[in-house]
Image (tube, rainbow, N blue to C red):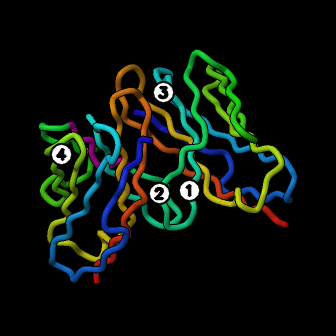
Amino acid sequence: GAVVSQHPSWVICKSGTSVKIECRSLDFQATTMFWYRQFPKQSLMLMATSNEGSKATYEQGVEKDKFLINHASLTLSTLTVTSAHPEDSSFYICSASAGTGAFSFGQGTRLTVV
Amino acid sequence: GESVGLHLPTLSVQEGDNSIINCAYSNSASDYFIWYKQESGKGPQFIIDIRSNMDKRQGQRVTVLLNKTVKHLSLQIAATQPGDSAVYFCAANSGGSNYKLTFGKGTLLTVNP
């Protein structure tokens, strides 16, 4: 139980284009979803927290206009990297919580901007 | 703000030995702690968690110890196997109903056959 699926698992895009990453909770309703970014050999850094039906809360230093987060349903949150640049290349990971304090993580998305 | 750190960035052990990975946290309000295992190119995999009303919790081959006095927790892996080789992260919440997690820097565990 408590499975989170992230799609795609990897994506290559051209500089200046936008990329959408999906995060789905498959067998539970996720009241809160979290988006993390992880650079090589570094830890996970929280980018934003999203609650279903409301605007995401972004961490300090994360541009909300560049990283658009939509949490339209209790089972789906999306992260759109707009006008991607090579420095946005990273491993993006989502996690979901049903509000019980337990977290489930997706398998991550490797974004490469060329 | 919350900061969670690890004492050692790398740990190398022989197969069959016990491994101990340490973690320190700074927010005294944190009341939920989790250890994750992350293999290359994959998302974090839950290992074990502990709440602040406990000081020890055991799982299969793993034990987490929590010392709230010094804000320290550790992960002990018994009879370490090559399949345990990965990066291990501790994570702590911000306390109460806040479910936001802060991750430590990670320890790379290498198990030598």
The residue segment tinted magenta is A46-51
- Give the number of callouts: 4
| Kind of residue at badge 1 | Gln
Gap in angstroms between the C-alphas marked 4 and 1 = 26 Å
Q: Earlier in the sequence, mark 3 or mark 2?
A: 3
Residue at 80% across, 44% down: B78
Image disc number at residue B38: 1
Q: Earlier in the sequence, mark 1 or mark 3?
A: 3
Image disc number at residue B27: 3
Q: Chain of mark 2?
A: B
Q: Specify the principal SS of the magenta part.
A: strand
Q: Chain of mark 4?
A: A
Which image quarter: residue B64?
top right
Residue at 32% across, 46% down: A25
Q: Nearer the viewer, mark 3 or mark 4?
A: 4
B61 on left or right of B102 = right
> Would residue B69 be counted in the magenta stretch?
no
Which residue bears the numbered disc 4?
A71
> Would residue A49 be counted in the magenta stretch?
yes
Gap in angstroms between the C-alphas marked 3 and 2 = 25 Å
- Give above or below for B31 relative to B10: above
Disc 2: CA contacts within 10 A as few (<14), some (14-19) or many (>=20) = many
Image disc number at residue B43: 2
Answer yes or no: are tags 4 and 1 on the same subunit. no
Q: Position of residue A80 (x, y in %)?
A: 19, 61
Q: Earlier in the sequence, mark 1 or mark 2?
A: 1
Residue at 40% across, 33% down: B1
